Image (cartoon, rainbow, N blue to C red):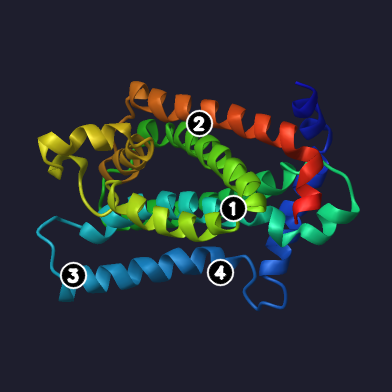
Amino acid sequence: MHYIRELVKYRAMTGQLVRRDLCVRYRKSAFGFLWTFFNPLFQLVIYSMVFSVILKSGREAYALFLFSALVPWLFFSSSLTAGCTSILAMQDLVRKVYFPRMVLPISCVTGQLVHLQLSLPVVLAACWIGERPVRLCALAWLPVLIVVEYLLALALACILACVTVYLRDVEQFTSLALMGWQFLTPVMYDAQQVPEELRWIFRLNPMTPIITGFREVMFYGNRLCLKSLVWPFAVGIVFLILGIWMFYRLEGDIAENL
């Protein structure tokens, strides 16, 4: 609880690091934050061309079907990738100034959350143009999905950031694990297409109900089943507690091992 109170005390620093990351990323850029809209829009155009002309899929509006799940997945994968090296990237600051080191992965994941929030309107606009059933009663569940995914991404990013300080191979392992994890998550296909004998693996995957939930809300316009998010929320809470404990125990040794 003492460490959590310290994190709350340094919340202003977290906000400053998020703003710094966003400003540095778009510094001397003609379009600035508009690139946050251009990137998903460009991806959507490419996917639409590929799956409508070259790789014709039997599913109607497959590009939107894929895009509605790909955007939240990219937030999750980029959060873990950036959070994994968040302490190493700021090691000069860590050596000179004391602050709760967990602030660094928190700021990385929060920065990626800003990009997710700016990308979702592009997805919704594309679904509306593509005559998908965009319903307000379904979109009301988006904040719940975002909070659960943010919690899970933050928990794993904190653990990876702490372990990477002592074992640099974790960065490479994370990239490989995310590559395999994406194929074990129904991003490019429907969860109903998974053979019955393999569905238990997908049920253990905490990202399955999150990705399925985003697709149900944005692509199909259906309301979310709240019970489906109990598992990823529980996993996020457990891993977040573990991450806080790890930072609390190793706080004094992190700077020495950089």
Residue at coordinates 82% horizontally, 53% vertically from top-left? 94
Q: CA distance from mark 1 to mark 2?
A: 16 Å
Residue at coordinates 59% horizontally, 30% vertically from top-left? 242
Disc 2 secondary structure class: helix
Disc 1 secondary structure class: helix
Quarter in which the C terminus is drawn: bottom right
Q: Amino acid at mark 2?
A: Gly
Label of residue 52 in the image:
3
Nearer the observer: mark 3 or 1; the answer is 1
**Looking at the image, do the residues carrying marks 4 and 2 touch, with CB atoms under 8 Å apart?**
no
**Looking at the image, do the residues carrying marks 2 and 3 touch, with CB atoms under 8 Å apart?**
no
Label of residue 35 in the image:
4
Q: Horizontal and vertical percent for residue 133?
A: 27, 43
Q: Amino acid at mark 4?
A: Trp
Label of residue 214 in the image:
none
Nearer to me, 18 or 87: 87
Q: Residues within 10 Å of mark 4 (few under 14, many from 20)?
A: some
Q: CA distance from mark 4 to mark 3?
A: 25 Å
Is residue 200 depicted above or below 111 in this figure? Answer: above
Q: Residues within 10 Å of mark 2 (few under 14, many from 20)?
A: many
Nearer the observer: mark 1 or 2; the answer is 1
State the count of labels.
4
Residue for badge 2: 236
Residue for badge 1: 84
Residue at coordinates 17% horizontally, 38% vertically from top-left? 198
- Using residue 142 as the reference point, say whether residue 94 is left or right of it: right
Nearer to me, 183 or 28: 183
Q: Horizontal and vertical percent for residue 98?
A: 88, 45
